[in-house]
Amino acid sequence: MKNHHTDRQALTQAITGACIISFSPIIAKLSSLPSTTEAFYRMLFGGIALCIIAILLRAKFWQGWRPILYAIACAFFFAGDLYFWQLSIENVGPGLATILGNLQVFILTIVGVLAYRETITIRTIVAFPLALLGLIMLVGADWHTLSPAYRIGLYEGFIAALFYSGFVITLRKAQKDQDHLPPSSNLVMICGMAVVMLGILAFFQNESLIIHITSNWLWMILYGVLCQAFAWLLISKGLPNIPISYTGYILLLQPALAFIWDIVIFKRPTPPIEIAGAIITIFAIYLSTSGRKKMRSRVNA
């Protein structure tokens, strides 16, 4: 009974966090700051909020060098995800960029099979071409009619998916490590290191980190505290107790809701074929995760 309660609690935490994060691309779009600057302040304000939480919880910040190494890897993947994802938002919009970034579930499918001995069914096999069909309907079948910026945005979304996959896998592995840090202090480490990486990237891009408009300050504080600190704290607490095959399905809520917010808030012109493409793609992502079964997996060990 205790295990069932733990599973339900973990699912609730992860689902709530994913729903909150669905507003991330909306906030990023509402801000007028450059993409690297937005990512920098998301991690900065998120890290400050998480640090306060960790101190209040009296969380440990040192468990040896292994958690530090995991945090560096997580920071690298997450900084890369944010960077390419926000570039994609500028070129294709928050809804589509988030759907593209969340194609990470297909990578998690492969990892689940190879690393965790999870098996796949015919549903998972069908999901791959179905996702491709949905994407073709969503972005347009005639590639040559798309603008260069739009095409670049699609590539950026796919690259973000690769980085997102690396982050989710590394974060989950870090939280299941024998010497793992508490979720709050672990995320503080990740945010702090990502801030440094993004700051260096902004320097080499000659991108200013100065915020001149008051509304941008408010958006960035909300971006960091709500979407980075609170949401990812919930997700990181739930991930270790959730099979990796469920992880992609839960995080699927983010692109589904983000696409809806994009249409409702920004009045995104969305022909019926694109709506159908989005539904098919999201359904394919669902199939890719729900179509697998655990097979002597160490996920629940």
Image (cartoon, rainbow, N blue to C red):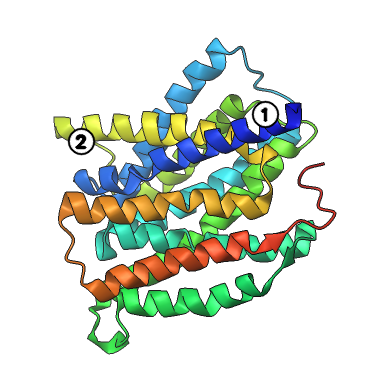
Neighbor class of circle 1 (other Cα within 10 Å; few <14, some 14-19, many 20+) is: few
Residue 90 appears left or right of 269? right
- The mark tally for this picture is 2
In the depicted structure, whether residue 235 falls above or below residue 148: above
In the depicted structure, whether residue 222 falls above or below residue 239: above
Counting from the top left corner in percent of width and height, residue 54 is at 55, 18
Q: Can residue 69 be seen in this view?
A: no
Quarter of the view holding residue 165? bottom right
Counting from the top left corner in percent of width and height, residue 85 is at 39, 56
Residue 209 appears left or right of 82? left
Q: Which mark is residue 5?
A: 1
Residue mark closest to the camera, 2 vs 1: 1
Secondary structure at badge 1 equals helix
Q: Quadrant of the C terminus?
A: top right
Q: Residue 216 carries which label?
A: 2
- The kind of residue tagged 2 is Asn
